Image (cartoon, rainbow, N blue to C red):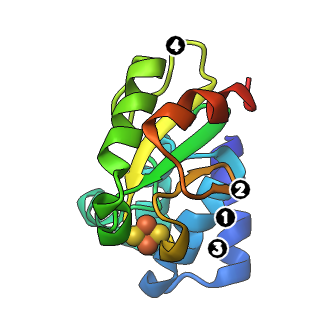
Amino acid sequence: MEYKSFISDTIAQLGEEPNKLIPLLQQVQEKYGFIPEETVDIIAQNLNLSANRIYGVMTFYAQFKLKPCGKHLIRVCEGTACHIKGAEGVYESISGKLGIHEGETTADDNFTLERVPCVGCCHSAPIVVVDSDYHGNTSANMAKGILENYK
Ligand code: FES
């Protein structure tokens, strides 16, 4: 019921044309932290789109999450500059320390780990972004220290 009323209120603001799908999904994610499965059917009915089309859009745009995130989102840049400067080692170090792989969340729901394309700070590669904090010139050895700040 809550999903239904949030979605109809949001559609009332945005409009119900099919091209409002992305802004609507953004608002659902902002509110719930991810796109709950139940909301997809509600959106499909309201915008007169198929659920498959909505899932297609959600999987095409990396910004949309189909599962809830941990308290802290760690994004390891895997763009070219970061890759050349050792991003893979940084990723492996974080992944090993937390015991999770890309797209997974720790059992205590504290961290979700992602690999992302260039985040626009190539001069400080390799970059790790935790929530909205950018950590530059990282190394595999620094990974553990960075995580200590987010317990
Ligand atoms: S490649 Fe990582 S910030 Fe650009």
Q: Which residue is mark 1?
A: 8
Do callouts 1 and 3 mark residues in contact (Cβ within 8 Å)?
yes
User: Label 1: how many residues lie within 10 Å, few (<14), some (14-19) or many (20+)?
Assistant: some
Question: Mark 2 falls on what kind of element?
Answer: helix
Q: Closer to us: mark 3 or mark 4? A: 4
Q: From what the image shows, is residue 6 above or below residue 140?
A: below
Residue 118 visible from this viewpoint: no
Q: Which residue is mark 2?
A: 6
Q: Earlier in the sequence, mark 2 or mark 3?
A: 2
Question: Mark 3 falls on what kind of element?
Answer: helix
Q: Mark 1 is on which residue type?
A: Ser
Q: Nearer the viewer, residue 102 or 4?
A: 102
Q: CA distance from mark 1 to mark 4?
A: 34 Å
Question: Mark 1 falls on what kind of element?
Answer: helix
The quarter of the picture where residue 37 lies is top left
Q: Which residue is mark 4?
A: 107
Q: Is mark 2 within 8 Å of ligand 1?
A: no
Q: Residue furthest top?
A: 107
Q: From what the image shows, is residue 43 above or below residue 47?
A: above
Q: Position of residue 60 (x, y in %)?
A: 29, 66
User: Label 3: how many residues lie within 10 Å, few (<14), some (14-19) or many (20+)?
Assistant: some
Quarter of the image where the N terminus is located: top right
